[in-house]
Image (cartoon, rainbow, N blue to C red):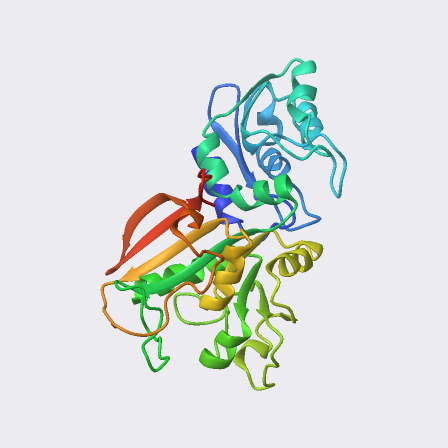
Amino acid sequence: MAAALALSEDVRGRTSPNPPVGAVILDADGARVGAGATQPPGGPHAEVMALREAGDRARGGTAYVTLEPCAHHGRTPPCAQALLDAGIAAVHYAVADPNPAASGGGALLREAGVDVRGGLLAADVAAGPLRAWLHRTRTGRPHVTWKYAATLDGRVAAADGTSRWISGPTSRGEVHRIRAAADAVVAGTGTVLADDPWLTVRDADGGLAARQPLRVIVGTRGIPETARVLDEAAETLHIRTHDAAEVLERLAARGVVDVLLEGGPTLAGAFAAAGMIDRIVAYVAPTLLGAGPTALGPAGVSTITEAHRWRVEGVTMSGDDVRITAVPVADEGGR
């Protein structure tokens, strides 16, 4: 299952609106004979890719899949039936499919005599490659990760507005990998006008990556035609509103599942006030500025009891910076 999880991670950002799933096939003797991951929309699912590689060696074998095999006929035939046709004897999956239209694959396989077990590495899969897709399926709106870089004293720019570079090269490289896995990167008009960012994904050599997420600019102000974000490197969508819910509704209608919020304090505050940040990735640099804007603008908090409460998922070094990841928690008297 760990190998299947790694395969799903490799295709994250390239499968939406379908989930990034990985699958590994073992033959009847326990040898690995096939592996695959979900292809772009309209292409085969992970199980089919793995079965193609395994061929006849799949008969009597075991399939490990990060998501319960689907049981419906959408753009492609049901994966549960493909596993049955291949003669698979056992199926282990990590996470049950929460989509009513596609779930039921496990039951279909059991009824046909296949040994089916769920829950293997479920927490790792749910918190990893399938995090955004599971959120989108359960809530109906895209998953939002807010990424920011700040100094030890919480500043995202100096008093004169300069902000390049607060974080170090290792962190900046990580950010490009995070962007590469997202369906859309969102920034406000204020950030575009002040910093003129490209909001593109670049490889280790500084060149443009082959696949670019949708660039989304939020705000009512106009953007000059010379802005870097309007170049031909990637598609750009300007949503003229300050309403976070409207932004996500527009993106959901386009099939966007995973959103990376890279806007400044005002935009981040609007999303936080609306309760529409699902994960924070913060890079804290060993730097002090003493003045300048803070990471988060007004977020609907006027007293300590209204504070937005978060649970830290992880803390690790990123070069000289500290990377902190956190998710919201329910808190009586809080958010």
72 in relation to 199, above or below: above
In the image shown, does 275 or 3 lie closer to the viewer? 275
Q: Quadrant of residue 247?
A: bottom right
In the image shown, does 32 or 201 lie closer to the viewer? 201
Q: Position of residue 200 (x, y in %)?
A: 50, 69
118 in relation to 149, above or below: above
Q: Position of residue 105 (x, y in %)?
A: 67, 26
Q: In which quarter of the image is residue 108?
A: top right
Residue appearing at x 48%, y 19% in the figure: 29
Q: Position of residue 121 (x, y in %)?
A: 45, 30
Residue appearing at x 23%, y 61% in the figure: 320
Can I make out residue 211 in this image? Answer: no
Answer with left or right where residue 222 lies relative to residue 120.
right
Can I make out residue 104 in this image? Answer: yes
In the image shown, does 293 or 134 lie closer to the viewer? 293
Q: How many labels does the image show?
A: 0
Answer with left or right where residue 289 lies relative to residue 64.
left
Residue appearing at x 64%, y 45% in the figure: 18
Q: Position of residue 161 (x, y in %)?
A: 37, 79
Looking at the image, which residue sits at the far front?
A: 303
Answer with left or right where residue 154 lies relative to residue 89.
left
118 in relation to 4, above or below: above
Residue appearing at x 44%, y 39% in the figure: 331
